[in-house]
Amino acid sequence: MSILEVRDLNFSYGDQALYNNLNLKVEMGEHIGFLGANGTGKSTLLKLLAHKLIPDSGEIIWQDHVTFSYLDQFLEVDSDVTVLEYLNEVYKDLFLREEKLNQIYHDISLGIDLEKNSRQADFIQEELLQKGFYKINEKIDNILLGLGVQIPLDFPLKKLSGGMRAKVFLAKMLLEERDVLLLDEPTNFLDQVHIEWLVKFLNSYPKAYIVISHNFQFLNDVSNYIIELENRVMTKYKGNFLDYLNLKTMRSKEYEKAYLKQQEKIKKEEEFIKKNIVRATTTKRAQSRRKQLEKMERLEKPVVYKDLNFKFKFTRTFNMNALEVKNLSIGYDHPILKDINMKLAFGDRIAILGKNGIGKTTFLKTILDIIPKVSGSYDVNPLNKVSYFAQVEEPKDINAIDYIRLDYPLMDNEQIRSLLARFGITGELVFRSMRELSGGEGARVRLAKLTLEESNFLILDEPTNHLDKIMKKALFDALAEYPGTLIIVSHELEFINKLKLKQIKFQ
């Protein structure tokens, strides 16, 4: 019996329909990888399943007593709740039982209802033992360590970086151990060591999950089913990512043949109707064929994804140092990385590597004067014209057009829409709030804006997060062609190696 069933689901943003009577069944124990190009509606579907959005039509049926959790990487935190307090919310009921137990022990110490309270205390004590209450801290520590969260547990959640906050959200989700996990790009802020830990965790997970990822190796390692959203239709494949590729090739060829055959039939029928509809002797036959044609369930035209291409605007460079760092210590309340030394000439191209939490993003923010240094020095050449792509940008409650216009007020709507179209942001998407865009769509808008800046120094922090393979290729081509100074932080070693960047490891 299915624990989750989607029946004839339809959902639109404005005039843009994302799904065509979409159907899906999920059984307990299914580990589903979710594929589709940016903008096809993957993140939207998870939000629909999590009741964050309401469908236009159709049904989303969760079986009784089935629990689920949804990873929202952009969840805002306004309170001063600490990391530990946030994670302990998972065990709220157990902490309430402990409070009850302590009250009972207090009553026993006063000699109140000794026999009754002793029995109740024994019962609650056994309950807490069976539910692992006394191993909560150990469990939290293990998951935080596995995900690379190395911060004081009394640190306010709202003061964490976007990436670190997303990892804490993921940690809570894993601690909850719900029947179904809805995971949207869980590896975005994880380095390879912690991705491998997550793979092991998910492979041993006895329940079900649906995971969106553009990391195909990760999908291959954690999936026993693949679902693909294409042509507004969802297709489910049994097996891992490699199995999907083989089946996909065969199905795509069959679908294309069926589509072409149907188009040929439609053309012949339309020609017959046109020739015979006005003839008295054949009009009834023509009308009958027209009715049949109207009732025909037409196949969607196979999507052919066009290559995207763009360039970063380059201005003059100089024959001197672009950046010099001496004995630099960085951090917030205390140093997290000390004695950084680095010298970059104009035109040098480097990748900064290192485990999560080591200070890569903090280093970038320090040399950009976003946060103060702890000690040491850095000299940024005043002739630099820096363009910066942040790892996380809090989404604004404005549409993509207005987001561009904030910094480029002289651009008219037509110019902005033309720019966004080159990045695959078209139609209704340009009017959708940046908060409502998927991670991949938001990243495309931010990259589009970056291409308007003239620079001779690009600083990019995890720019491939959320990007599908088409957009990654376009970004690679743009960076390969860029002649200026480049600093990039990325966990995608394959991307870094292809760019042939000098690698500097923080440790």
Image (cartoon, grey):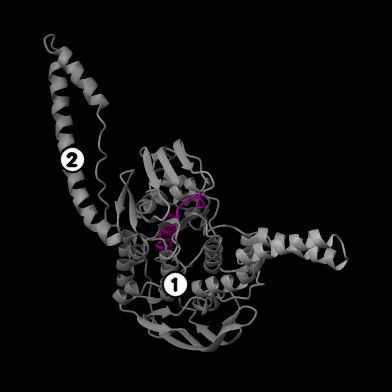
Badge 1 or badge 2: first in the primary sequence: 1
Name the residue type under label 1.
Trp
Q: Secondary structure at mark 1?
A: helix
Q: Is residue 19 above or below residue 176?
A: above
Expressed as whole percent of the image width and height from the top left, the position of residue 119 reads: 75, 61
Expressed as whole percent of the image width and height from the top left, the position of residue 363 reads: 52, 79
The residue at which mark 2 appears reads as: 258
Expressed as whole percent of the image width and height from the top left, the position of residue 428 reads: 42, 43
Q: From the viewer's perspective, is 435 left or right of 132?
A: left
Q: From the viewer's perspective, is 135 left or right of 6?
A: right
Residue situated furthest front in the rendering: 115
Q: How far apart are the two marked residues, 1 and 2, measured between alpha carbons? A: 43 Å
> What label sits on residue 197 in the rendered view?
1
| Mark 1 in CB contact with mark 2 (< 8 angstroms) | no
Q: Is residue 247 above or below residue 8?
A: below
Q: Nearer the viewer, mark 1 or mark 2?
A: 1
What span is colored magenta in the figure? 433-451
Q: Residue at x 39, y 55 (%)?
A: 30
